[in-house]
Image (tube, rainbow, N blue to C red):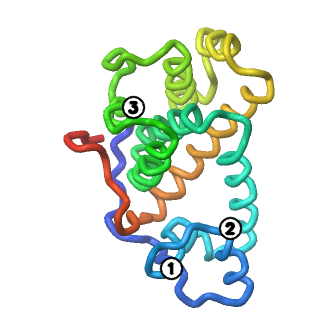
């Protein structure tokens, strides 16, 4: 895993001068208790057209065919592999709501052999690892996935992993900071 230093402050601060067009787009995103959009959406708001389409595609993946727990295992593992603390923190919250325990979330930051994952869960982790390492699922990973998920679910799994690699790169490069109340890495875990 490369060791590129992540920015410690935003390279582009979230948009604060919200136009009527942005108000409409941001009304469909997550809003913090202080009324501001979460930092990823505030940063994406620098490009309203991209933000609008990002929301549509991301919404499809977050409400797709896959069980939420399966999806979150892939997203959290991708976030870990990409060293994207913002992604990992946001999806720690979503992962908890999707049935992942804090122990399982922390285990996604370690070798799969260090936790009692099911064969299906190991295949999901392998997919995230393969795509983050080589941009292609290995034959062994594909065979394990194929044994469990439908064709449409397989398409969605690869799109989820790829999308969250893109998101992680965006978050890391832009220096998007954690929103208030969003956890960082699990206790004792250092990327």
Residue 99 versus residue 104: which sits nearer the camera? 99
**Category of crowding for the residue at label 1, using alpha-carbon neighbours closer than 10 angstroms: few (below 14), some (14–19), many (at least 20):** some
First-in-chain label (1 vs 3): 1
Q: Which residue bears the numbered disc 3?
A: 108
Residue 9 versus residue 22: which sits nearer the camera? 22
Query: Dots 1 and 3: beta carbons under 8 Å?
Result: no
Residue 153: x %, y % from top left: 73, 29
Q: Which mark's residue is nearer the viewer, 3 or 2?
A: 3
Q: CA distance from mark 1 to mark 3?
A: 30 Å
Q: Which mark identifies residue 107?
A: none
Q: Residue furthest right?
A: 152
Q: Which residue bears the numbered disc 1?
A: 36
Residue 15 versus residue 30: which sits nearer the camera? 30
Residue at position x 38%, y 63% in the image: 178
Residue 125: x %, y % from top left: 50, 25
Residue at position x 35%, y 70% in the image: 9
**Category of crowding for the residue at label 3, using alpha-carbon neighbours closer than 10 angstroms: few (below 14), some (14–19), many (at least 20):** many
Image height check: is 151 above or below 163?
above
Residue at position x 52%, y 51% in the image: 169
- Is residue 2 toward the left or the right of residue 17 in the image? left
Q: CA distance from mark 3 to mark 2?
A: 29 Å
Q: Identify the element where label 2 is drawn.
A: helix
Q: Which mark identifies residue 51?
A: 2
Q: CA distance from mark 2 to mark 1?
A: 15 Å
Image height check: is 8 above or below 105?
below
Q: Identify the element where label 1 is drawn.
A: loop
Q: Which mark's residue is nearer the viewer, 2 or 1?
A: 1
């Amino acid at each position: 895993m490369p060791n590129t230093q992540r920015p410690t402050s935003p390279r582009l601060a979230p948009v604060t001068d919200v136009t009527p067009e942005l108000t409409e787009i941001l009304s469909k995103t997550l809003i913090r208790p202080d009324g501001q959009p979460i930092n990823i959406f505030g940063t994406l708001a620098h490009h309203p057209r991209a933000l609008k389409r990002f929301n549509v595609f991301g919404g499809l993946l977050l409400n797709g065919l896959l069980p939420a727990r399966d999806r979150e295992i892939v997203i959290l593992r991708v976030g870990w592999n990409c060293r994207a603390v913002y992604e990992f923190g946001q999806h720690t919250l979503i992962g908890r709501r999707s049935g992942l325990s804090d122990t399982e979330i922390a285990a996604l930051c370690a070798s799969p052999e260090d936790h009692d994952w099911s064969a299906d869960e190991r295949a999901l982790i392998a997919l995230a690892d393969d795509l983050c390492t080589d941009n292609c699922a290995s034959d062994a990973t594909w065979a394990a996935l194929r044994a469990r998920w439908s064709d449409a679910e397989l398409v969605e799994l690869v799109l989820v992993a790829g999308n969250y690699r893109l998101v992680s790169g965006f978050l890391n490069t832009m220096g998007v900071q954690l929103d208030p109340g969003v956890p960082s890495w699990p206790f004792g875990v250092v990327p």
